[in-house]
Image (spheres, helix red, strand yellow):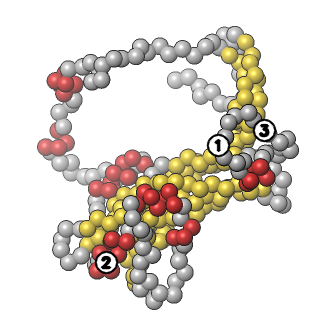
Amino acid sequence: MPDKIMPGPVSDGGSVREAVCIHTRKIYDSCRDKDCVEDLRFYPKMKYADVISRALSVKGGSAKLLYVYVDVEPVSFNRGFYTVDMRFFYEVTLQAYLSSPAPVTVEGLCVFDKRAILFGSEGNAKIFSSKAASGEPDVQLMRRSNCPIAVVEAVDPIVLDARIVESCGKRDCDCDLCEVPSFVNGFFDGELSSGDDARRIYVTLGQFSIVRLERDTQLLIPVYDYCLPDKECSCSTGGGEDPCSVFRNIHFPVGEFFPPNTVRMPENYEETRNFCSGCN
């Protein structure tokens, strides 16, 4: 197996054809996180408020990451460093159990706030472009025209736990629904409910994410050749293969007919996500 090429000087440059200057975003700093986010307030759709008020218990189902609001601010006491404030908006589906054995599916919103501090270097030049933009210039962008750009990459979270909490109504809200963007509310096709203060649902999510700070820069890079695709475009919508031939290549599912003596615990994200969804 060849050695993994890391950013840095390349010693073997025999096949390099030329050096070219390109404009791109350089990553100055990045981090990754595996957050176990406990006790997120669950805000159901209004039509499920009565179901939750009568529910005996709830179990986790699935969660979908809808949007992440990202804001970058310089750290005043440490030059070149910036705080990256993130707010994750989730569409969460739970199973509510009433008196009947069959659960009722309820949907709602959960919100998670997170902060990271990363190095983003400094820049004093004001950057303008001839690229067309609709509307007036963004005042916030004009005021901070040379801040680094924060990029957040995340997968849909895993629902680890869900529970009903009986309270006296004096606990502070985890999230003000008035601060939810209108387009996020649009995902729920209806009004969200803050729920009964005497009964609330809290959800625990497992979230994987990568955060990085980037800046526009010019780099001199080696060029080996033009990147031309080798694969020809196929005109067949079905892949051009006989369905029976595809079926014949599938191995016989022995495990479906002979259950294993032990069940292997999930080891990666996809297995854990399917495991948590299947046991509810």
Check the image and name the residue furthest to the bottom: 168
Query: In this orientation, which residue lies closer to the viewer: 245 or 2?
Result: 245
| Residue at position x 45%, y 52% in the image | 156
How many numbered marks have been drawn onto this rendered protein structure?
3
Residue matched to label 3:
128
* Residue pictured at 28% horizontal, 80% vertical: 54
Identify the element where label 1 is drawn. loop
Which residue is found at the position 64% from the left and 43% from the top?
134
Q: Does the CB distance between marks 1 and 3 fall below 8 Å?
A: no
Q: Which residue is mark 2?
A: 50
Gap between marks 2 and 1 measured at Cα: 44 Å
Question: Mark 1 vs mark 3: which is more N-terminal?
Answer: 3
Q: Amino acid at mark 2?
A: Asp
162 vs 111, nearest the viewer = 111
Percent of width and height locating residue 107: 36, 64
Position in image of residue 27 (x %, y %): 69, 39
Is disc 2 surrounded by few (<14), some (14 to 19) or many (20+) residues within 10 Å?
few
- Asked if the residue at tag 1 contacts the one at tag 2, i.e. Cβ–Cβ closer than 8 Å, the answer is no
CA separation in Å, label 1 and label 3: 15 Å
For disc 1, the marked residue is: 134
